[in-house]
Amino acid sequence: LRTTVDIPEKLVNEAMRISHHKTKTSVIVTALEEYVRKNRIQHLKRFRGKLDISIDLNALRKRK
């Protein structure tokens, strides 16, 4: 996907410097992937304490 966006050059340069990415594309793709990953984690955290999962690990290990 090709698109034109107006991103502050200073911000992109700093992101490239601290992430050690060599291209603007790679640093932006990495940033988007990280954003999506963190968002998914936040979504899963909403279920914390709401699911009752009783798993007997010893029984699962013996199933082999």
Image (cartoon, grey):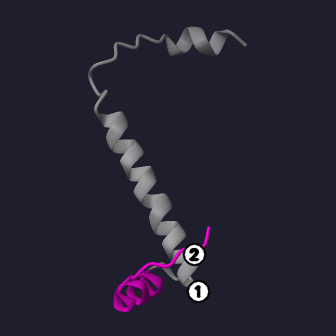
Q: Is residue 33 above or below residue 54?
A: below
x and y percentages locating residue 34 in the rendered image: 45, 60
Which disc number belongs to residue 26? Answer: 2
Numbered label tally: 2
x and y percentages locating residue 7 in the rendered image: 39, 82
| 6 sits left or right of 2 in the view | left
x and y percentages locating residue 61 in the rendered image: 62, 15
Q: Which residue: 42% across, 84% down?
A: 12
Which residue range is magenta in the image? 1-18
Which disc number belongs to residue 57? Answer: none
How crowded pointer 2 is (Cα within 10 Å; few <14, some 14-19, many 20+) is rated as: some
Q: Is residue 30 above or below residue 5?
A: above
Q: Which residue is mark 1?
A: 22
How crowded pointer 1 is (Cα within 10 Å; few <14, some 14-19, many 20+) is rated as: few
Which one is nearer the viewer's eye here, 46 or 7? 7
x and y percentages locating residue 27 in the rendered image: 51, 76
> Residues under labels 2 and 1: Cα distance?
7 Å
Mark 2–mark 1 contact, CB under 8 Å? Answer: yes
Q: Which residue: 41% across, 58% down?
A: 35
Q: Is residue 48 above or below residue 50?
A: below
Badge 1 element: loop
Q: Is residue 8 magenta?
A: yes
Amino acid at circle 2: Ser
Amino acid at circle 1: Lys
Q: Which quadrant holds the N terminus?
A: bottom right
